[in-house]
């Protein structure tokens, strides 16, 4: 038997360790992985609370993002070998191109699909990517959702250019990655936060000069001042609601907004006139394909980008890790070691 942590979607306190049988025999295209680290995302809170696909009976294995070592490969697998260090794509059939109604159902760690907080599991080889060589397993585990979502908003769809302004909200997992990717791509970053201490830490560690407080409702005015009246070119909007409306006010002509999250509200009222006259593009982001995850991993290697891990929890402290994530006291990522 092997160890796992499961969720029934009925609350964080219902998360529980569970013994599972060893994975079944390998099929030709699968890889057997020994999981080394798992990182948490805001989505894991929603899954555990039944707000993402409802309750699960029987419970499902929790979490979607891992790093691990290849133990065995199926007979058709040519891109990986035992001993390779890998990370997983959370949609295991979205390999490249556009999302569709088939691919969206295969999102691990939610929607009734078992996740990755388990000692060993089988995964389709095409949905695995080689972990950046220089990263620890803990760091590698943070790329699957947070890193990839940031990548999709900043690079794949935001297409940020050197010298452009990028605005990002908060200091959570997606936002810290977005700022790091943008800086390495040569953009100038403005970050918002509600927490002065976090703002100071981010300034020191990432060298972001412009950090403003999103609780001050006139923050779009501050963005305009910082950008000499022009506004920003790319926005990574993890909040929705009134924040999205204000993000639009803070935009330059031809700006690209990645609409990612709903921490402020699930609906938003903004002036279409601003979107039309400034020719702003709003793009919904729902992570990206394995091909883009690989592009992110190679970008990280090129720039030696260090994922920001706030805290590492041991496997038996999984519930504490979820509660710490819920408290929003963290900066960047929270990781569970196996
Ligand atoms: N669409 C996708 O593909 C995708 C992928 C990943 C995440 N998401 C979504 O993106 C959001 C962030 O996810 P995450 O995993 O990065 O979360 P996280 O690590 O828990 O980040 C939370 C941080 O967001 C900031 N925040 C909270 N409320 C805010 C608000 N009203 N306005 C601005 N910032 C606010 C806070 O930063 P400060 O303490 O600095 O204020 C907070 O600490 C969630 O809604 C999540 O569901 C979407």
Image (cartoon, rainbow, N blue to C red):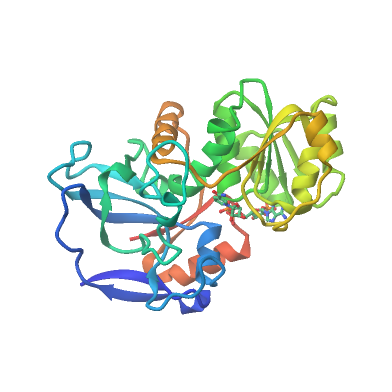
Question: Which residue is most to the left?
Answer: 75
* Residue 242 screen position, x and y as percent: 79, 52
Question: Which residue is most to the front?
Answer: 101
- On the picture, is 242 further left or further right than 152? right
Query: Where does the C terminus fall, quadrant-wise?
Result: bottom left
* Residue 102 screen position, x and y as percent: 42, 52
Q: Residue at x 65, y 49 (%)?
A: 238
Q: Residue at x 53, y 72 (%)?
A: 50
71 in relation to 16, above or below = above
- On the picture, is 93 further left or further right than 199? left
Residue 191 occupies quadrant: top right
Residue 250 appears in the picture as rendered: no
Residue 295 occupies quadrant: top left
Q: Residue at x 24, y 53 (%)?
A: 33
Residue 272 occupies quadrant: top right
Front residue of 330/110: it is 110
* Residue 178 screen position, x and y as percent: 58, 39
Q: Which residue is drawn at 44% across and 76% down?
A: 8
Front residue of 294/198: it is 294
């Amino acid at each position: 038997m092997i160890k796992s942590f499961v969720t029934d979607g009925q609350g964080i306190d219902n998360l529980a360790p569970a013994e599972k049988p060893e994975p079944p025999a390998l099929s030709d295209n699968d890889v057997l992985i020994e999981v080394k680290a798992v990182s948490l995302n805001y989505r894991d809170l929603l899954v555990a609370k039944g707000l993402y696909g409802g309750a699960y009976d029987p419970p499902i294995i929790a979490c979607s993002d891992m790093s691990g070592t290849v133990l065995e490969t199926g007979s058709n697998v040519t891109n990986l070998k035992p001993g390779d260090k890998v990370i997983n794509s959370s949609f295991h059939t979205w390999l490249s191109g556009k999302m569709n109604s088939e691919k969206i159902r295969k999102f691990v760690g939610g929607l009734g699909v078992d996740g990755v907080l388990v000692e060993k599991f089988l995964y389709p080889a095409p949905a695995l990517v080689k972990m950046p060589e220089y990263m620890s397993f803990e760091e590698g585990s943070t790329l699957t959702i947070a890193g990839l979502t940031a990548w999709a908003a900043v690079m794949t769809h935001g297409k940020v250019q050197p010298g452009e302004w990028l605005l990002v909200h908060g200091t959570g997992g997606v936002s810290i990655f977005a700022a790091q990717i943008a800086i390495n791509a040569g953009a100038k970053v403005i970050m918002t936060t509600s927490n002065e201490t976090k703002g100071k830490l981010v300034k020191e560690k990432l060298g972001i000069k412009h950090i403003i407080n999103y609780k001050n409702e006139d923050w779009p005015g501050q963005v305009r001042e910082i950008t000499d009246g022009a506004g920003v070119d790319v926005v990574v909007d993890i909040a929705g609601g009134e924040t999205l409306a204000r993000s639009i006010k803070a935009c330059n002509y031809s700006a690209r907004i990645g609409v990612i999250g709903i921490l402020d509200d699930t609906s938003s009222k903004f002036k279409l006139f601003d979107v039309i006259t400034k020719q702003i593009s709003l793009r919904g982001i729902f992570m990206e394909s394995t091909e883009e995850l690989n592009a992110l991993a190679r970008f990280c290697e090129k720039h030696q980008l260090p994922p920001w891990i706030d805290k590492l929890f041991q496997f038996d402290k999984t519930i504490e890790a979820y509660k710490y994530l819920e408290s929003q006291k963290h900066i960047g990522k929270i990781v569970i070691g196996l």
